[in-house]
Every structure is written in C-alpha cells, then in structure tokens.
Amino acid sequence: MIKNDSVIFIAYLDGKVVGFTQLYHLFSSVSMEAMYLLNDLFVADGLRRIGIGEALINKTKALAKVESQKGIAIQTAYNNPAQELYKRLGFKPDTDLHFF
C-alpha cells in the first residue's frame, strides 16, 4: 500500500488465495462523513456460496464500524448475482441516484 488509496482484504483457504475485496475511501459532503466504496468482491469459481464472500463483507463492516465510517456503498453491475448476498447481509439498493 503505497498511497493508502484503498483497503484490500484477502481470503485464504488451505494457504491459497480464494477471494478478495477492495474498498475505496469516499467522503460525503452532504453528511460530512467518511465512508467506503466496496467496488470489488471476488470469490474463486467453485468456492462461491460457502461463506467466503460473506466473511469478506463482514470484515468490511467491522472495519467501517471500528473507524466510525458513515457506511459502505457497493458499486456492482445490475446483473451481478452477488446482489443476493448483499441484500441478505442488509444492504439495500439506492433508489435515489442514477449513474451514467
């Protein structure tokens, strides 16, 4: 980490990398609070749905709480199947914003 541009959590299983998540620092000028953008969540094929993604997100939530972040925003493709995981873990789609 040279510039502290992001935070990366890496998941290992039997000594091998099986997933990661990358968080970027954001700042809300409306609330004047820092928050994270979860832009990348990856779990290796064949190892999905066994709790690796959930563990990575829970680690992210714990960091945000310890650092008193406003919250975590998730940027994902509209057809990303991981959206079910995000919803199950309490994240809600933002219906107020539209990006181009």
Image (cartoon, rainbow, N blue to C red):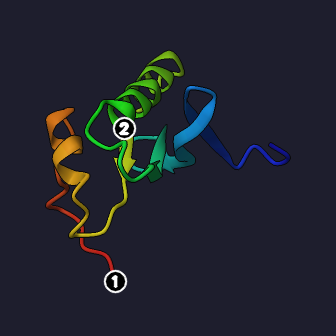
Which residue shows up at 63% across the image and 28% down it? Answer: 15
How far separated are the C-alphas under marks 1 and 2?
27 Å
Which residue shows up at 44% across the image and 48% down it? Answer: 38
Q: Quadrant of residue 76?
A: bottom left
* Mark 2: few/some/many CA within 10 Å (<14, 14-19, 20+): many
Name the residue tied to disc 2.
Answer: 53
Q: Secondary structure at mark 2?
A: helix
In the rendered image, the vertical position of residue 96 relative to residue 32, given as above or below: below
Q: Is residue 73 left or right of residue 78?
A: right
- Residue 9 seen in the current view: no
In the rendered image, the vertical position of residue 71 relative to residue 76, given as above or below: above
**Which of marks 2 and 1 precedes in the sequence?**
2
On the image, the x and y values in percent for residue 27 come to 52, 47
Q: Indicate the quadrant containing the N terminus: top left, top right, bottom left or bottom right.
A: top right
Q: Which amino acid type is shown beneath numbered disc 1? A: Phe
Name the residue tied to disc 1.
Answer: 100
Q: Indicate the quadrant containing the C terminus: top left, top right, bottom left or bottom right.
A: bottom left
Q: Are marks 1 and 2 in contact (CB under 8 Å)?
A: no
Q: Residue furthest right?
A: 2
Near-viewer residue (99 or 50): 50
